[in-house]
Amino acid sequence: MSDDDADAESLSPEARPHIAANGVRQMAAQALQSVGDQVVNAKTVLPWLVSALGAPSAFVAFLVPIRESGSMLPQAAWAPRVRSRRVRKWVWVAGATGQAIATAGLALVAATASGTVAGIGVLAALAVFALARSLSSIASKDVLGRTVPKGQRGQIKGATTVASAAVALTLGLALRAWGGDGLGTGVIAALLGGAALAWAGGAAIFATIREPAGEATPVDEDGPGWVRQSVELWRGDAVFRKFVIARALLLVSALSPPFVVTLGVQQGAGLSSLGLFVIAQGIAGLVGGRVFGRLADRSSRRLMIGASLAASAVIVAYLGLLRVPGLGETAWLAAATYLLLALVHVGARLARKTYVVDIAEGDQRTQYVAVANTMMGVLLLAVGAVTAALAMLGGEFALVLLAVLGVAGAVVGRGLPEAGRT
């Protein structure tokens, strides 16, 4: 990573001598976080664990909503407290520590519990995990904006995505080698214990970042509450409003893969192995992380538009190929579609994360991130409920809606201003 003098001017003088070192430390800490994320995965590992422990299938339905919404909804409430701190890396450290503790709790449940007790234990630990993750999420972009200049932030996100993908690929291959769905819960418990150690290591590394102290905004206990401030931001800031709408429509790449898997199973070409799901995610990250990171630095806006259209195109192509006699039953169709959607999702995530860091400055960035994530938590539940209702008619109906939303997201994205290098 090279320092660009023009871009470095956007940072405080105290931060400029430490750009390279801070970038490496953030990549290392977030790579360790990504290691843990591959194990505490609400779409692959945790559903398998809940089923293997003999918990009722109803518990599986709550995993993704708790993981995603639980980490987003509290952020607007956290934001005033975070803005009151001059140094905000400790907020990330606290979040990582909480995730380590929650993951250790998941390991304990995996090793000792079964049935309904295990299901309750997994959901409780996951709720704690999600709340802790909300702290890390709200602080990470703020620390990144204070310590690394524009033009380099997307590359850091891309590098950590590649590291995460390498871990996912290795883990997936190991799970396949050890027997896939025949694995015992003791192995998953050991992996969860290792993930807890990864978060503890990430917290230790992040604590060494040389973050310049910024201005602290005192918490105004008598002023308008965070709900009112969020409403005022939504009403008064057109760029923020369009970004939240575009990001909500980008859910097409996050919510469509489970429906593709379900249709694949119905066609007799299901991805039955836990390891195969993890491998697909790993390949997507390895291929997309660095490429999309650079594209995000060039224009995160254009990358958001492209990701929306690409996800919709993949869905439409998949639904069309399902109608081809003899092709819909082939084993590779659902797997290839899942992989493509996972790849597109890498680009979508890097684009919207880079955009929100670049579009705002200082405390405005903290507020943008917090309020956007809180609103996304609500929208995620709403879109999830609608697609779940449509899925009762058939997975194809839910996919059609998501494809339409992706096209709408591209239209909204065209109205956003550029936010990269100037």
Image (tube, rainbow, N blue to C red):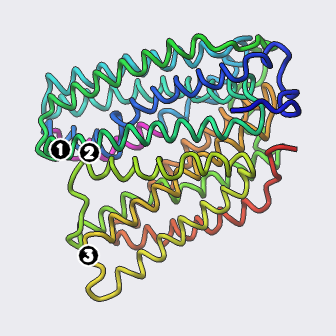
Between circles 1 and 3, the one closer to the viewer is 1
Q: Residue furthest bottom?
A: 325
The residue that appears at 73% across and 54% down in the rendered structure is 301
Q: Position of residue 389 (x, y in %)?
A: 39, 62
Q: If you read the primary sequence from the N terminus, does the residue marked by circle 1 or circle 3 appear first?
A: 1
Badge 2 amino acid: Leu
Instruction: Return the residue at label 1.
Output: 177
Between circles 3 and 2, the one closer to the viewer is 2
Give, as a single range, the part of the protein colored magenta: 55-68
Mark 1, Cα crowd under 10 Å, few <14 / some 14-19 / many 20+, is few
The residue that appears at 73% across and 32% down in the rendered structure is 2
The residue that appears at 71% across and 25% down in the rendered structure is 225
Q: For numbered disc 2, what is the local secondary structure? A: helix
Q: Looking at the magenta stretch, what is its main secondary structure?
A: helix
> Residue 335: which quarter of the image?
bottom left
Q: Position of residue 306 (x, y in %)?
A: 64, 63
The residue that appears at 79% across and 45% down in the rendered structure is 420
Whether tag 3 and tag 2 are in contact, CB under 8 A, the answer is: no
Whether tag 1 and tag 3 are in contact, CB under 8 A, the answer is: no
For residue 66: magenta?
yes
Q: Residue 173, which numbered label?
A: 2
Mark 3, Cα crowd under 10 Å, few <14 / some 14-19 / many 20+, is some
Badge 1 amino acid: Ala
Instruction: Return the residue at label 3.
Output: 330
Mark 2, Cα crowd under 10 Å, few <14 / some 14-19 / many 20+, is some
